[in-house]
Image (cartoon, rainbow, N blue to C red):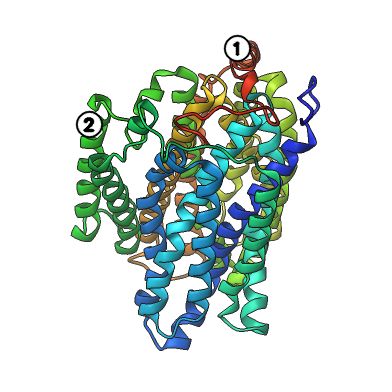
Amino acid sequence: MNPQPSGDRLPREYLKIGSALVLGAAMAMLDATVVAVATRTLAERFGSPLSAVAWVSTAYLLTMSVVVPLAGWAMGRFGGRRVWLLSVTAFLVGSVLCGAAWSIPSLIAFRVLQALGGGLIQPVGQALLGRNVGPRHMARVMAVMSVPMALLPVLGPAVGGVLLAEWGWRWIFFINVPIGLAGIVLVRRWVPASVGAAGSAGPAADAARFDLRGFALISPGLAALVYGCSAAGDHGGFSSPAAWGPVLGGLLLVTVFVFYSLRTKIQPLVDLRLFGDRAFAVAMLNAALMGATLFGAMFLLPLYFQQAHGVSALRAGLALAPQGLGTAISTFAAGRLTNRTGPRVLVLTGTAVATAATLPFAMVGAGTSAAALMAPLFLRGLGLGLVMAPLIAAGYSTLRRESIPQATTTFNILNRVGGSIGTAVLAVILVRGLAGRAVTPAHVASAYSATFWWALGCTAVTLVTAAFLPGAKAMRAALAAAAAHQAPNAVGTERKPVTAAA
């Protein structure tokens, strides 16, 4: 039997679980950043226009939007470890086929297969972590896992540049194979198996029935929203039918799903009843806002360095190293402090620091040097790193373990949708700012300055919602209640089959 947590000591078993699961998430994130660097190379290799090559990424994102809502149901039906292993296997098969692609259409098709697995890796891995580790140590383990995740957006362009220069474009996909295989081996060794409802009868099987009506509403609705937001960025606004059509259609489907999920008698794919828990609801709202801030800025910052300072995509990615370093440092610290200070203090502090550090970008001019922005980038990273682990810990603190798969599905949906909307809004503002005048350094700086003001405002809004997160006293009470209720499910103890097993 594995030793149980004692005081604030973090058991080695939990670190093993986190280390094994982070390999899958890291592989998927590395793939996304590396493929983004290869867009022009793929266009030249296959003699295709950039608009066609863009679907290599667009098809991947849309497919992920379709499969993410399936995470909670799949875990309840088949067990979380099994679903994670199958997801990584599908991602690896898709990666090998992508590396063997002979045309852009074949590459797009194989990216869809890759995304069928990639869309489940993060929510399932996060749920496995939550159910095995529990809320008491969730923030600290998430902090350890977040360190490599914070550095990957920086390392990804460099890795992609080396692979393209030395080994060729096919290796931007083949590089996933050793990482994924290592993850499969370690998860099989270190992550406890769990029991799903497959093959069972009675209430467990009923709860694990597939919500076909819900799937027909939420998955195409999310895909339409993501596509519409992407089209808005490409067309310079939501006035184009290619943008507002999918957005309106997506909003309609999602709205219908909301009413349906609150009335259905079976387990919905996304359980909106969880929003009746105040801590969870506030954490999810903050997750959506942080998604808009993080993804929007990750779109804006590399473009700024490329257009305003004339650097390559590779150097623009490396210019973000200070932010990645700051995020890694503060994320690790946040994991140790969350249970002591409560999520509210950390999220408010982190958001305030990130907002202040974004101000220099909102004041850039034609003469602003890239070197002058390195310190603000580091401070911005420090602020952002204080936010995510406390948010996840707050969202899980008052939930039963059997609710965690549904919670992680909801978190990932809101984070992605928030990111799509944030990116689209900033893209529209930037495109309009750059249009209509001669492209001069002053004009480019002015357009980016105006766009960064919007990014700053988006970050600052989180200060309002973060004020409603649990404080230290509420967090300690929630963790004590969770420990009393969930002690039998700790790592290393005998597990009883549950309907929503991880």
**Of helix, strand and loop, which one carries label 1?**
helix
Side of 276 relative to 440 (left or right): left
**Of helix, strand and loop, which one carries label 2?**
helix
Side of 342 relative to 16 (left or right): left
Q: State the quadrant of the N terminus.
A: top right
Q: Which mark is residue 111?
A: none
Query: Which residue is denoted by mark 1 in the rendering?
Result: 481
Query: Which residue is denoted by mark 2 in the rendering?
Result: 260
Q: Amino acid at mark 1?
A: Ala
Side of 142 relative to 36 (left or right): right
Towards the viewer: 245 or 224: 224
Residue displayed at 44% across by 44% down: 454
- Give the answer, above or below, for where 346 lies relative to 122: above
Percent x, y of residue 176: 60, 67
The quarter of the picture where residue 69 lies is: top left
Percent x, y of residue 18: 68, 43
Determine crowd level at label 1: few under 14, some 14-19, many 20+ residues with C-alpha closer than 10 A.
Answer: few
Residue displayed at 66% across by 31% down: 133
Residue displayed at 58% across by 32% down: 131
Percent x, y of residue 405: 48, 35
- Give the answer, above or below, for where 1 lies relative to 49: above
Q: Are marks 2 and 1 in contact (CB under 8 Å)?
A: no
Determine crowd level at label 2: few under 14, some 14-19, many 20+ residues with C-alpha closer than 10 A.
Answer: some
Percent x, y of residue 192: 64, 40
Which is more N-terminal, label 1 or label 2?
Answer: 2
Towards the viewer: 320 or 17: 17
The answer to whether any part of residue 479 appears in the image is yes
Mark 2–mark 1 Cα distance, whole angstroms, equals: 32 Å
Give the total of numbered labels. Answer: 2
The answer to whether any part of residue 369 appears in the image is no
Q: Amino acid at mark 2?
A: Tyr
Towards the viewer: 252 or 216: 216
